[in-house]
Amino acid sequence: MKLSKKEKDFWLCKYNIKAVTKIPSEMNGVVSIDSEVDDEYLFYLTSRVPIIRKFDLENTNITNAGVKLISKVQQCESLQLIQSRYITAECLADINQMESLRILNLLKTSISLKDIRVLDNLKNLEELHISSKEAKEHVRAIIASFKKVSPGCRIFLNYDEFIEA
C-alpha cells in the first residue's frame, strides 16, 4: 500500500522513514512532552503501527478522538496524559477497552476520581494517577468500589498521595 503525500511527509519528518515497508509493526513507546502532538499525529501513527506499548503524552494537544485512536492499538501497557488539556471524561469508555493497560496517568486533566467509576474493564491496572477534589469520605468509597474491579491497583491522587481503600 502506498503512502499519501501527507502521510509520507509525516513518516519522513517524524521518524525519518521513507518507505511504507520500513514502518515498524511494533513500537516500544511514544514519548512527547510539552509538544504540539495532536490527533493527526496519532492518526498516522496508529493507522500503520498496530502494537505500541507506551504513550507518554504529557501536555500535548491530543483530544478524546486521539485517545480513541490509541485505544485501538494492541498491547498498550502505559498511557500518560498528564496536563493534556483537551482530555475529558468522555474518553474513559475508550480507555476502558485497553485491557493490557497497567499504568494510567490522568493527573491535571479534567477527569476526576469520581469519573473513574466507568473503568470496569481494566483488571490488569497496577497504577492510577488522578486528580481529586472530592472530600476524604467520598474518596475512600470511590476507591473501594474501583478496587473491586482492579484489586491490585494503587491509586495516587494529586501527584504524591497514595490512598488505600
Image (cartoon, rainbow, N blue to C red):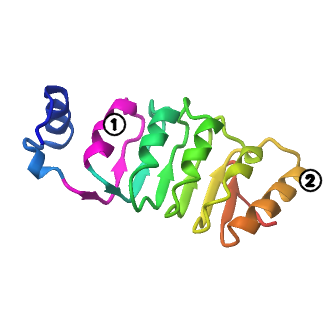
| Among the 4 quarters of the image, the one containing residue 25 | bottom left
- In percent of width and height, residue 14 lies at 21, 38
Task: Write the residue at 66% across / 34% down.
Answer: 110
Examine the structure image and report whether residue 115 is included in the region drawn in magenta.
no
Residue stretch rendered in magenta on the structure: 24-48
Task: Write the residue at 27% across / 51% down.
Answer: 49
Q: Which quadrant is the N terminus positioned in?
A: top left
**Residue 51 visible in the current orientation:** yes
Examine the structure image and report whether residue 39 is included in the region drawn in magenta.
yes
Q: Is residue 145 above or below residue 72?
A: below
**Residue 159 visible in the current orientation:** no
Count of numbered marks: 2
Helix, strand or loop at disc 2?
A: helix
- In percent of width and height, residue 84 lies at 53, 35
* Residue ID for mark 1: 43
Q: Which quadrant is the C terminus positioned in?
A: bottom right
- Amino acid, disc 1: Phe
Lower sequence index among marks 1 and 2: 1
Q: Which mark is residue 137?
A: 2
Q: Farthest top residue? A: 6
Helix, strand or loop at disc 1?
A: helix
Compared across the picture, whether 120 is left or right of 8 comes to right
Label 1 Cα neighbours within 10 Å, binned few <14 / some 14-19 / many ≥20 = some
Q: Farthest front residue? A: 1
Compared across the picture, whether 9 is left or right of 155 comes to left
